[in-house]
Amino acid sequence: AVKTFELMLASYKWPKGSQVAVSSGQGKADEAGGPPYELMQHPPLAVLTNGFLASFNELRHCVPKAMSGDLTEDLNGQLREVGLALKWYGVVSDLQDGERQSFRSLCDQYSNCVIPYLRRSFEGMMMNE
């Protein structure tokens, strides 16, 4: 999921800042329990989230609770890796002002929506086993 995100981020065509709404969410799932709707504003984040959810779905059938700590560390490492990729992209990219505003919105969505949602989803998966 992380590598796909990095590739998508590198080729992403940023919308102008005025086209991106500001998130009020804290990674709250929609009424059906799915990912936060705000993620649809940024396709790279939606793809990243779907990649993690697909992994969780595969794990939920076979993961023993004893591996919970190791898997939590791995998830946190992957989330840090995405954060570092975003930081690096922000440094080396040549974004115009409107595009930079969109990039900041994506970063905010990652911190305020994606991370909390994925952590809750992971914890829910581990509790249901």
Image (tube, rainbow, N blue to C red):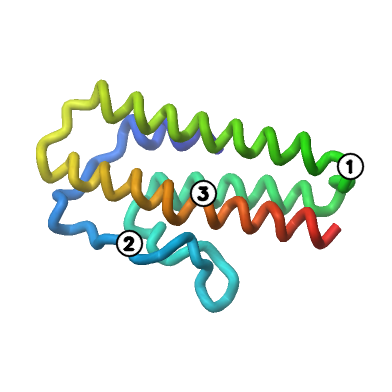
User: Could you tell me how far apart the alpha carbons at marks 1 and 3 are, in whole angstroms?
Assistant: 23 Å
Earlier sequence position, callout 1 versus callout 2 = 2
Query: Do the numbered discs 1 and 2 sit on residues whose CB atoms are within 8 Å?
Result: no
Q: Which amino acid does label 2 sit on?
A: Ser
Give residue 19's quadrant in the image. Answer: bottom left
Q: Where is residue 66 in the image (x, y as percent from the top left)?
A: 89, 42
CA neighbours of label 1 inside 10 A, class few (<14), some (14 to 19), many (20+): few
From the top left corner, tell me how far across and down residue 54 is, in percent: 65, 50
Residue found farthest to the top: 92
Q: In which quarter of the image is residue 87?
A: top left
Residue 9: percent from left, percent from top: 36, 35
State the residue position of label 3.
Answer: 115
7 vs 29, nearest the viewer = 29
First in sequence, mark 1 or 3: give its number: 1
* Gap in angstroms between the C-alphas marked 3 and 2: 14 Å
The one nearer the camera, 28 or 61, is 28
What secondary structure is marked by label 2?
loop
Disc marking residue 23: 2
Q: What element carries label 1?
A: helix
| Secondary structure of the residue carrying numbered label 3 | helix
Q: Looking at numbered disc 1 in the image, what kind of residue is underneath it? A: Ala
Task: Relative to 20, say whether 15 is above or below.
Answer: above
Residue bearing the label numbered 1:
66
Residue depicted at 16% across the width and 33% down the height: 95
Q: Is residue 9 left or right of residue 74?
A: left
How many marks can you see? 3
| Amino acid type, label 3 | Ile
Using the image as rendered, state which of residue 63 and residue 115 is in the foreground: 115
